[in-house]
Amino acid sequence: VSVDAITLPNDTPAGHLAASIQRGEAPADRLRSAKLGLWFFIASESCLFAAFIAARYVTTGVQRPAELDQGLGLAITSILIASSLTAYLAESFARLHRYDRAQIFLWATVALGSLFLAGVALEFNEGLQHFPPSTAYGTAFFSLVSLHAFHVATGILALAVASNLVRLRRLETLGAWRIEAVVKYWHFVDLAWVVIFPTLYLVS
Amino acid sequence: VEGIAEVDDRPTASKKAIIVGLRVIAALAVLTFLEYLASRELTHATVAVFALAIVKGWLILDYFMHIRNLTGSHGYEDSSDREDPHSSKTPIEATEAEL
């Protein structure tokens, strides 16, 4: 079944929106719907992270292995927090139509995100020696950090795409929204780590 | 008079954005370090670290993700709805005017 074959009644809000999109009208409505959709997506992703975090407490309580490297955890957390600043500045400059500066901060965010992933790889290497995935804590640690690392990787990809759109000057129709959407997702990834960091490294 | 109205206010706005961002990031850094200290110094650190984590989470949601803009007069409103920073019209108003 192709998407074109689906018809929605025009007297419903969804049908009205679909018809206006097909006619190429009402970009403001589309923008508002896209923003609301992004928040729904973030809410659903939050539920996924909440399930993994709950599993950590159910299986191991607040226990953590003595070999866990809290210093490395603090270092990668600092990197991710710093990336939030660069992402925020990219969004701010895009809103002011200063796309050259926005592009610089987008790439800075990509660099910091990649550095974070490198730190996670180091942590995995240490973790495999002290608390392998076959242990209860290892299961919680590797599943939660892997889930988060996957989100960081997709965030990096999205930031790179957004930066490329800036370079190609393809922001005429929706303006800064494309950058704002990617940056919001990046802040969500940061927010998830704000809960994951104490859950895995700090509680006792 | 029109010339005065068209003065570029973007440098001021850029500076404001940078200051807000730096303040929030400084607060996040301090709170993260306090979490780390609490974990090392307190025997039962769970409540303390989560109290600090909640404050950090709110800072990100409020200042970086602009969650308060979800409750606008149109159900969803955002300052970024203004495509042109020099225009007093939102894209919604601009579209209505065009139609």
Image (tube, coloured by chain):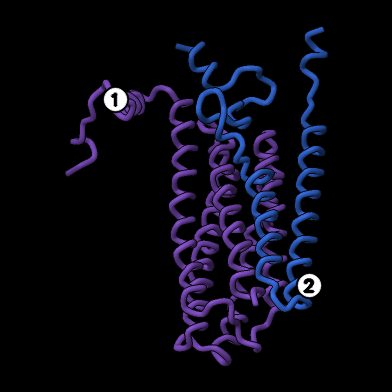
Residue A173 percent location from the top left of the image: 51, 31
Q: Which residue is mark 2?
A: B37
Q: Nearer the viewer, residue A48 or B54?
A: B54
Marks 2 and 1 sit apart, C-alpha to C-alpha, by 55 Å
Q: Which residue is mark 1?
A: A12
Q: Quadrant of the N terminus of chain A?
A: top left
Image position of B31 with respect to A34: above or below:
below
Mark 1 secondary-structure assignment? loop
Q: Where residue B21 is drawn, which disc sits there?
A: none
Residue A171: % across, % down: 55, 36
Q: Nearer the viewer, mark 2 or mark 1?
A: 2
Would residue B73 appear left or right of A3 to someone viewing this image?
Answer: right
Kind of residue at disc 1: Thr
Q: Are marks 2 and 1 on the same chain?
A: no
Which chain is mark 2 on?
B
State which chain disc 1 sits on: A
At label 2, which amino acid type do we have? Leu
Chain A: what color? Answer: purple
Color of chain B here?
blue
Residue drawn at (66%, 48%) of the image: A103
User: Is the residue marked by circle 2 packed among few (<14), some (14-19), or many (20+) residues within 10 Å?
Assistant: some
Residue ID at (69%, 40%): A92
Local secondary structure at mark 2: helix
Q: Position of residue A4 (x, y in %)?
A: 22, 35
Rendered image quadrant of residue B66? top right
